[in-house]
Amino acid sequence: MIINDQAGIKDKVIERLKMVFDPEIPVDIYELGLIYELHTFPDGVVKVVMTLTAPACPAADQILQDVQNTLAGVEGIKEARVEISFDPPWDKGMMSEDAKLELGFF
């Protein structure tokens, strides 16, 4: 994951991202490895580049809205911009060890 933390709030942002779940998977989007880039800027803008577990994910709109709503509650954030990328495509190897354990991939 690429992190550019000019505003010094990455820990708060990551904590909030861990509150967002794919409704079909009982693991948060951060531990699933769906976050590719996180950029915070001194003007209060946060940019998140993320992916989905599948390009045709039926919950895509909900997940994006959940990310924006969740980040809106972070002190210092005026605007959250969320961008979807499928490059590289997500695979199970991107999950954290905790996520793999939770989902029984060991």
Image: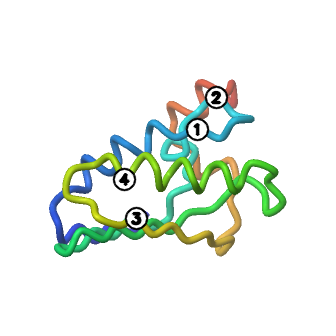
Q: Amino acid at mark 1?
A: Phe
Instruction: Give, as a three-letter code, the residue at label 2.
Output: Pro
- Mark 2 element type: loop
Q: Nearer the viewer, residue 72 or 89?
A: 72
Residues marked 1 and 2 touching at CB (< 8 Å): yes
Which residue is drawn at the image coordinates 26% and 47% (left, top)? 12
N-term-proximal mark, 1 vs 2: 1
Q: Residue at x 79, y 63 (%)?
A: 55
Whichever of labels 1 and 4 marks the residue nearer the N terminus, that label is 1
The percent coordinates of residue 43 (x first, y second) are 20, 75
* First-in-chain label (3 vs 1): 1
Choose mark 3 or mark 1, whichever is in front: 3
Q: Check if mark 1's residue and mark 4's residue have beta carbons within 8 Å.
A: no
Residue at x 81% of width, y 50% of height: 58
Q: Which mark is residue 21?
A: 1
Question: Mark number for residue 48?
Answer: none
- Whole-angstrom CA distance, mark 1 to mark 2, is 7 Å
User: x, y (%) of residue 21?
Assistant: 58, 38
Judging by the rendered image, the residue that carries numbered circle 2 is 26
Say which mark, if any, is on residue 80. 3
Which numbered dot is residue 72? 4
Residue 3, position as x, y percentages in the image? 33, 66
Task: Where is residue 29? Give x, y as percent.
Answer: 55, 45
What is the distance, in whole Å, between disc 3 and disc 1 at their CAs? 17 Å
Few, some or many residues within 10 Å of mark 3 (<14, 14–19, 20+): some
Q: CA distance from mark 3 to mark 4?
A: 7 Å
Separation (CA) of disc 3 from disc 2? 24 Å
The amino acid at mark 4 is: Ala
Q: Nearer the viewer, mark 3 or mark 2?
A: 3
First in sequence: mark 3 vs mark 4: 4
